[in-house]
Image: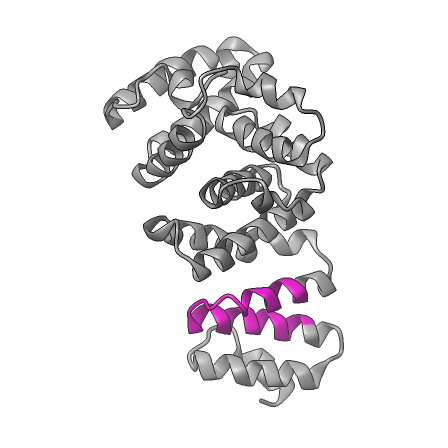
Amino acid sequence: MENYYTLLGVGQDSSSAEIKKAFREKAKRLHPDVAGKAAEAGMRKLLTAYEVLSSRERRFEYDRAYFRFIKKVDFNYRSWLLEQGDDPASQAKLVFFELLHLEEDSAIEIWRKNGGIHFDMEKYLDREDWMDCLYILSEELDKREQYYEAFRLLVVIVREERRVPYFRHFMEDIEMFLRELVRLRLKTQVDDETWIDCLETLLELDFSPGDEARWMRSLAEVLVRMGETAAAGAMIREALKRDPALPNITRLRRKLNV
């Protein structure tokens, strides 16, 4: 099975320029205008590999995950895992193995079969493998517009990182991913009660006062829609304590007489 390097046809020590050149050459052959619709899946995999390996931070994280998890075995690990049947430890390892080899649809199918967001993979993977697995999985769920599931996984990562750091310098990118998911995409897929639960969860994660103020403003807006004006007013007051210059708040303040 291909990893990100073999898919692009480059070595692990390849430079950024070599990775870019390899991507362009392969992309020309796989582009749907040249190879037809049948090549779309291959093009998506190629793009995923390039997006990761062309970023210094993401390449470092991929190398750390892949060469820790995969290189410790010298046999057909995937076949062996499949032979273990429904054993949850083998299933968790198989999810991670498939993700690291660009078999994302298979990984998600196995993950969902075992309970999805309720599959406690931390019981069966080393902590580092588990956290890397959740991050790659959340990216793939986001690409497939499964925003709520992606959100739940990112929350687990952030909470665990707050407890004991692992991603460290890369955590800024993960937090930005979570912020953008919430700001731009998540709300379209959840009802008001779930949206409130998501925002309240974010407020437990020790983000900046500015982030918390914006999430409180969103909470107040949904509380107003639900007729909970007293609670909405209290939320706005708390938001302004964190950010007195909070934007897009004037009309809501007037409506709530805050």
Magenta span: chief secondary structure: helix
Please count the marks in the image: 0
Tell me where residue 183 sits by quadrant.
bottom right
Give residue 94's position: percent from left, percent from top.
59, 29
Examine the structure image and report whether residue 217 is included in the region drawn in magenta: yes
Reply above or below: 114 against 190.
above
Q: Give the residue displayed 26% in from the left and 20% down from the top.
A: 18
Q: Which residues are magenta?
A: 196-222
Q: Give the residue displayed 57% in from the left and 32% down from the top.
A: 93
Examine the structure image and report whether residue 57 is included in the region drawn in magenta: no
Give residue 60's position: percent from left, percent from top.
33, 37
Q: Is residue 174 left or right of residue 251?
A: left
Give residue 214's position: percent from left, percent from top.
51, 70
Q: Give the residue displayed 42% in from the left and 69% down from the top.
A: 208
Reply above or below: 44 against 195.
above
Front residue (pair 123, 237): 123
